[in-house]
């Protein structure tokens, strides 16, 4: 009997919470471009939302060879679809740069490049 009650409670919670989870989504695309001369990393992010003040990219973490060099937290995103953040990053040829963008509701996307 206790198992049946637990199963019903679990399913009820799942159904109630599902609409919010279905509306939440992470970024659909993160692409990196490194400017060696300027020592900057451009991070275009595609995250299409209806309200960029309530549903947005919350954090962007940048690593070079696995070490975090930038970790930014945001409270909104600058556009409701595609936008670009630029970060100062000092990297040598052969270094692997990664950036991970995370939604404030659900999901993330990561891209990596090797400095030529």
Image (cartoon, helix red, strand yellow):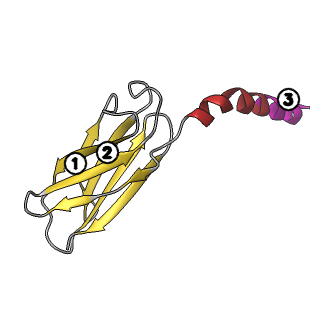
Q: Kindly identify which residue carries mark 3.
A: 5
Quarter of the image that includes the N terminus: top right
Position of 62 relative to 15 (above/below): below
Label 2 to label 1: alpha-carbon separation: 8 Å
The residue positioned 27% from the left and 45% from the top of the image is 84
Q: Name, please, the residue furthest toward the left.
A: 37
In primary-sequence order, the first of circles 3 and 2 is 3
Label 3 to label 2: alpha-carbon separation: 42 Å
Q: Residues within 10 Å of mark 1 (few under 14, many from 20)?
A: some
| Most foreground residue, 7 or 62 | 62
Q: Secondary structure at mark 2?
A: strand
Q: Which mark is residue 60?
A: 2
- Mark 2 vs 1: CB contact within 8 A: yes
Which of the 4 image quadrants contains residue 10?
top right
Q: Residues within 10 Å of mark 2 (few under 14, many from 20)?
A: many
Q: Kindly identify which residue carries mark 1.
A: 70
Classify residue 63 as left or right of residue 24. Answer: left
- Start and end of the magenta stretch? 1-9
The image position of residue 29, as x and y in percent, is 42, 52
Classify residue 34 as left or right of residue 38. Answer: right
The residue positioned 88% from the left and 34% from the top of the image is 4
The image position of residue 28, as x and y in percent, is 47, 49
Label 1 to label 3: alpha-carbon separation: 47 Å
Residue 3 within the segment the image draws in magenta:
yes
In primary-sequence order, the first of circles 1 and 3 is 3
- Mark 1 vs 3: CB contact within 8 A: no
The image position of residue 107, as x and y in percent, is 49, 44
Quarter of the image that includes the C terminus: bottom left
Classify residue 89 as left or right of residue 51. Answer: left
């Amino acid at each position: 009997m206790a198992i049946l009650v637990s199963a019903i409670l679990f399913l009820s919670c799942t159904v109630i919470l599902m609409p919010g989870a279905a509306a939440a989504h992470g970024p659909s695309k993160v692409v990196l471009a490194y400017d060696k001369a300027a020592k900057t990393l451009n991070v275009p992010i595609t995250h299409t939302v209806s309200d960029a003040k309530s549903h947005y990219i919350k954090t962007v973490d940048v690593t070079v060879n696995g070490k975090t060099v930038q970790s930014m937290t945001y409270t909104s995103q600058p556009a409701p679809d595609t936008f670009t953040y630029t970060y100062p990053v000092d990297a040598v040829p052969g270094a692997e740069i990664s950036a991970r963008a995370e939604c404030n509701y659900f999901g993330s996307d990561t891209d990596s490049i090797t400095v030529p």
